[in-house]
Amino acid sequence: HAAHALIAFVDHSERALPQPYVEAVLQAIAQMLHDGPLLVRSQAIALMCSVAETHKESIGAYYSRLMPLLKDVLQRSIQDELALLQGQTINAITALGEAAGRAAFHAEAVWLMQEVFLPLMQQGTRALLGQAEEEDTEETSR
């Protein structure tokens, strides 16, 4: 619930959080991503996206610490077929990458395309082809 309250505060605040608080929040996010249960990780990711939108310069410094944690959450969410968490995590990865800059994000962008998007597209294509084959089989059996 604390992460949810912070998300609301960050999203609706007139002013940016003072730098010491941003760093404390980012450290807490890293800890939640590292060892928190699924719901806590999901809230940490949403909070990280909110902080990334308002404090790009601060979050870029946490790139090397947060990116491996986000990649781990994304890989686990794909294995467990958790679509909402996948979307949240992809959003967080791209927000963090935007804050860190093109040069820092390049390797993860390539990884994201090759290891995440390409298999998802292939899976979708196979599902569509399977569905088309089932429809063809139904039509010929009539």
Image: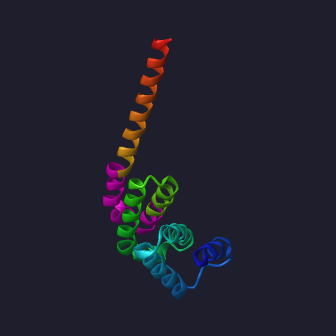
Q: Residue at x 50, y 68 (%)?
A: 45
Q: Number of marks in the image?
A: 0
Residue 129, x across and y down, in percent? 41, 28
Q: Is residue 99 or residue 63 the one in the foreground?
A: 63
Q: Is residue 24 left or right of residue 73?
A: right
Q: Residue at x 34, y 66 (%)?
A: 104
- The stretch drawn in magenta includes residue 55: no
26 above or below 122?
A: below
Q: Main secondary structure of the magenta part?
A: helix
Residue 132, x across and y down, in percent? 45, 24
Q: Find the magenta span and give its range.
A: 94-115
Residue 127, x across and y down, in percent? 42, 34
On the image, which quarter does residue 106 sit in? bottom left
On the image, which quarter does residue 30 sit in? bottom left
80 above or below 57?
A: above
Q: Residue at x 60, y 79 (%)?
A: 2
37 above or below 128?
A: below
Q: Residue at x 61, y 76 (%)?
A: 1
25 above or below 118?
A: below
Residue 126, x across and y down, in percent? 38, 34
